[in-house]
Amino acid sequence: MQIKSRFSIAIHILTCIAYFKDQYRVTSEFLAGSIGANPVIIRTVMSALRQAGLVLTRQGSADISITKPLDKITLYDVYLAVECVSGEGLFHLHEHPNPACPVGRNIHACLVPHLEKAQIAMETVLKETTLQDIVDEARERERQNEN
Amino acid sequence: MQIKSRFSIAIHILTCIAYFKDQYRVTSEFLAGSIGANPVIIRTVMSALRQAGLVLTRQGSADISITKPLDKITLYDVYLAVECVSGEGLFHLHEHPNPACPVGRNIHACLVPHLEKAQIAMETVLKETTLQDIVDEARERERQNEN
DNA sequence: CCAGCGTGTAACAATGGTGGTTACACGTTG
DNA sequence: CAACGTGTAACCACCATTGTTACACGCTGG
């Protein structure tokens, strides 16, 4: 099981907007070209980012803007926007433990606190990285490639 | 996306073995009853636990044993045994970023270190809990239910 | 020693989620 | 108003997970 690629696509989208907004008209087709996915996928992810308040778009116009300074948007914000873990938590517990069994009727309650702690630890690390970091690192790598 | 329920099933299996081994004959059917899943699922998960060296079984005989002291088996060991993240990592990156684009050709290299760090943080928490903890907590909850 | 029980595993169906594609209404802009 | 771009629904294809059946093989007790 893996966290869906919409997450990395969303980061890629935002990075591209920041990277190219002064240079090109950033359309969903332009983004699709860089990302290697269908423009509709891009628009769907963009829709999630818009609903999360991270970007502003206008229908009919190739006019995308990011609503906050890049160093105020963390990977966790993006992760929330694309709903990587859909309310149920990262770990999928088996659904029919037997309530007549002393283990079955307690196992979920025993596991949940530990698993939630693990999930939160992962999410906490995502909060430590901002889009500014990613854009800076991309620029830095690009500089090194040139030499 | 969620981590598959085989993980919690595996923990349930091991907890049941520890909890009932002196009291009942612990067969895959017995476990299936407590877990609420098909006996074949149990045997499949058991097969993974066996290959990971966590349990010993004998074909034809309802004779399951755990190979290590419970406080030496962490949730992470179980997580590895059932291959929750299948070698590719927890995060699924989009697969065709455009190498002709300065963002596309660098985005994966930029993201991987951050995402791996998040995954490792989650796994580190799993290492902090042992099966002994789970069994103890299940017994404790059972005691409280009785009153 | 063999009948009944239990495990190990292959094969296949059912389900659900993810990603891809087409289609089209609607807004924007020159 | 024509060309372009977005927003979204509808549908398909694919794959992973789970459920189920089937059967070979090993163990154990009378």
Image: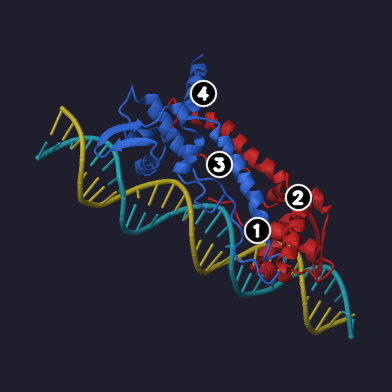
Chain colours: A blue, B red, C yellow, D cyan
Residue B34 in the image: state x and y as whole percent. 69, 68
As shown in the figure, which amino acid type bears the numbered disc 2?
Thr
User: Which residue extends farthest front?
Assistant: B147
Contact between labelled residues 4 and 3, with CB atoms less than 8 Å apart: no
Contact between labelled residues 2 and 3, with CB atoms less than 8 Å apart: no
As shown in the figure, which amino acid type bears the numbered disc 1?
Ala
According to the picture, the residue beneath numbered tag 1 turns out to be A109
Contact between labelled residues 4 and 1, with CB atoms less than 8 Å apart: no
The Cα–Cα distance between marks 4 and 2, rounded to whole angstroms, is 39 Å
Contact between labelled residues 2 and 1, with CB atoms less than 8 Å apart: no
Residue A115 in the image: state x and y as whole percent. 64, 50
Label 1 crowd bin: few (<14), some (14–19), many (20+), radius 10 Å: some
Label 4 crowd bin: few (<14), some (14–19), many (20+), radius 10 Å: some
Residue B97 in view of the camera = no
| Callout 2 secondary element | loop
Q: Quadrant of residue C7?
A: bottom right
Q: Earlier in the sequence, mark 3 or mark 2?
A: 3
Q: Chain of mark 2?
A: B
